[in-house]
Amino acid sequence: MGGLKRDPASRDMEAVRAVADALNAADSLLLTCHVRPDGDALGSVLALGLALKDAGRDVIMYTEDPVPERFGFLPGSGLITNDPEPYLSGEFTLVVLDCNEPARIGSRAADLIGRASNIVMLDHHLTRVLDWNGKGTIAYVDSDVFATGAIVYWVLEALGWPVSEDVASNIYLAILSDTGCFCHSNTNETALEMAARMVGYGANPFKIANGLFQNYPIRRQRLLGLALKTLELRGHGKIGLMQVTPEMFRACGADESDTDDFVGYVRAIGTVEVAVFIKEVYSGQVYVSLRSKTSYNVAELAQEFGGGGHFHAAGCRFPASADDVRGVLLERLLKDFSGSGAVDD
């Protein structure tokens, strides 16, 4: 998320136009995003999907994982399916949002890519995969853009299509989510101007923020309490680590979506430069969320372990236990923050 382009005119209009033309030429489209969809992914899928439906297109909106409960208030969320097969017939254009790696779509990736007549991709992650199982893509990928939802809006502008209140609400949610309520380093003039424009189209900031941040189930707060007990600072306070285990999930009756932004509680500590949240939902299956504040590139760290993401926000997976992953990541981070893997605190 570093090195942001402040000038909205800096967008790649040729790429925007190519995407717009591809969408405009398609009669049937399947829209999807990465597994474990977040606010930007869901907001982008819903905004573009609803706009395409308004334009008379045949649209399927699909995510492998169910829409998290906390996003159920989003306009159109009930239209998202976890099984696209009953709705697929004939040719379709595959549109992938907030993701540019085939595997991150999920288990149906190879099948959907193989059956698609065209592939369109909108994303803002640092990694860039344009050859999808031998198929090229029509893409707009720019890691300097604050949210994929912003690219969706630029495409709608290029198409000259109206922005309904429902479309605007989903774009606003995408921006709000990926700028961390306009607190992250990717918040710039364009992000604020676009958010204001969505309000002008009918998005309700209070309703969206309330639905996103003031509507948690009690099980989530109980899980957070257990997670905070595992909080540890190392590297003279610059490294913060926290974790949840299958036992914690079972004790609270919680699920994976309940851990959304737990890593933010680690990052919020004043001395912390790199925040690590380790999530073991099922035994031996670990997902790690990484966040940084200033000059540390967590995307590069994630890539070392087969993951990816943004400069200040990234993630990776491990076939191991939470305790084992914690040890591996701490040893690696201590090399950067204290010159060796030795215990320092």
Image: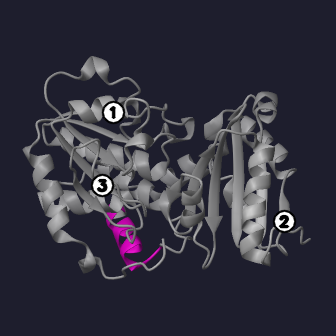
The disc placed on residue 233 is: 2
Is the magenta region chiefly helix, strand or loop? Answer: helix
Q: Residue at x 85, y 60 (%)?
A: 232
Dot 2 or dot 1: first in sequence order is 1
Q: Dividing the picture into quarters, in which one does residue 238 lie? A: bottom right
Q: Is residue 19 left or right of residue 222?
A: left
- 189 shown above or below 135: below
What residue did someone put label 1 on? Answer: 110
Secondary structure found at label 1: helix
Q: Position of residue 212 (x, y in %)?
A: 55, 49
- 336 shown above or below 199: below
Q: Position of residue 271 (x, y in %)?
A: 78, 76
What residue did someone put label 3 on? Answer: 122
The residue stretch that appears in magenta: 187-198
Q: What residue type is disc 3 on?
A: Leu
Q: Dividing the picture into quarters, in which one does residue 63 lie? A: top left
Secondary structure found at label 3: strand
Disc 3 residue crowd, few under 14, some 14–19, many 20+, Cα 10 Å = many
Q: CA distance from mark 1 to mark 3?
A: 18 Å
Does the magenta portion include 329? Answer: no
Farthest-out residue, right: 345
In the image, which is nearer the foreground, mark 1 or mark 3? 1
CB contact under 8 Å: marks 2 and 1: no
In the image, which is nearer the foreground, mark 2 or mark 1? 1
Q: CA distance from mark 3 to mark 2?
A: 37 Å
Residue 268 in sight in this render: no
Dot 3 or dot 2: first in sequence order is 3
